[in-house]
Image: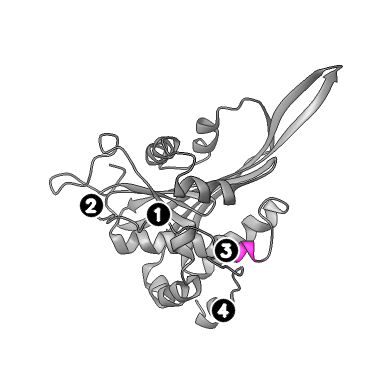
Amino acid sequence: MIHLETIKAITLPEFTASGVPAAPPPRERAGRSSAEINSGALLVFGAALTSQMSSDISNSVLFSQLAADAQFSRFVKPTEWVKRYLEVMSQIGWIQTSFDARTPVSVPAPAEWVPIVTQILRSGQALAQAGITGAQALAQASAPMKIWNGNAFSGDHGLMMLVPAQLASGSIRADFGLTVFEFDHEIDQFLSWSLAYQITQLSSTQELDEEVYARVRETIIEKLGNRPRYLVADVPLKLEELAPCQPQRSCQSIP
């Protein structure tokens, strides 16, 4: 059971927009696949999702990230951060249907990041790949890249979240793939170093109870305030890679 007072009591970090440029307003999402940088996450929305559904997913992910940020550094204490993130998601109506934590591994540099961050997903890999392709085409000085660089990385540490979301059998489903990494180097011999990434990954598939979320939607919007204007920015997708939802074709799965 969701207690509204519990959601109202959740603390978010202080935020001031002074000197921070606002991202352009999001485009209409209904009937077309779309993507956004959402603080330290890349969200990709399937074409079958309505604008309200996409907005609810976006606000859920941002709210839960910020609630976790208020208690833990995602770079210093990633395990605690992720636990708090998932806890808040459950409090606002997201039901976890699967969870997988991988054994930490060492990956030599340079790493092939695309397969690394997509293989952890239980589903939605094609949707995620389209979002990654769109993000890779962004200019370094663009609004979404500034948001991403400021929230997904800190020095040699990073916590990257990839979230493809879609309709599955009539339910809003999101696959959360989280990759925590730390850049590492060891001295092999004089003037010789081994460079690698220490990587820890987990995935969580969740479905949104829309009736539950409807009861907390306005509270979440109120608590977020103007933060989405500065922490969320659209990522353009190539329409030929993910065609828009057409009346004659099924839109219940990845387009």
User: Which residue is the site of mark 1?
Assistant: 173
Q: Nearer the viewer, residue 133 or 250?
A: 133
User: Which residue is the site of mark 3?
Assistant: 66
Query: Which mark sits nearer the N-terminus, 2 or 3?
Result: 2
Q: Which class describes the residues within 10 Å of circle 2: few (<14), some (14-19), or many (20+)?
A: some
Query: Which mark sits nearer the N-terminus, 4 or 2?
Result: 4
Query: Which mark sits nearer the N-terminus, 1 or 3?
Result: 3
Q: Residue at x 55, y 27 (%)?
A: 112
The residues tagged by marks 1 and 2 sit, at their Cα atoms, a distance apart of 17 Å
**Could you say which disc has been placed on residue 150 in the image?**
none
Q: Residue at x 69, y 57 (%)?
A: 73
User: Which residue is the site of mark 2?
Assistant: 31
Q: Which class describes the residues within 10 Å of circle 3: few (<14), some (14-19), or many (20+)?
A: many
Horizontal and vertical percent position of residue 129: 41, 36
Horizontal and vertical percent position of residue 156: 70, 40
The residues tagged by marks 4 and 3 sit, at their Cα atoms, a distance apart of 16 Å
Nearer the camera: disc 4 or disc 1: 4
Q: How many marks?
A: 4
Mark yes or no: residue 100 visible: no
Q: Nearer the viewer, residue 214 or 113?
A: 113
Query: Which mark sits nearer the N-terminus, 4 or 1?
Result: 4
Circle 1: residue type: Arg
- The secondary structure making up most of the magenta span is helix
Secondary structure of the residue carrying tag 3 is helix
Circle 4: residue type: Thr
Secondary structure of the residue carrying tag 2 is loop
User: Which residue is the site of mark 4?
Assistant: 6
Query: Which mark sits nearer the N-terminus, 4 or 3?
Result: 4
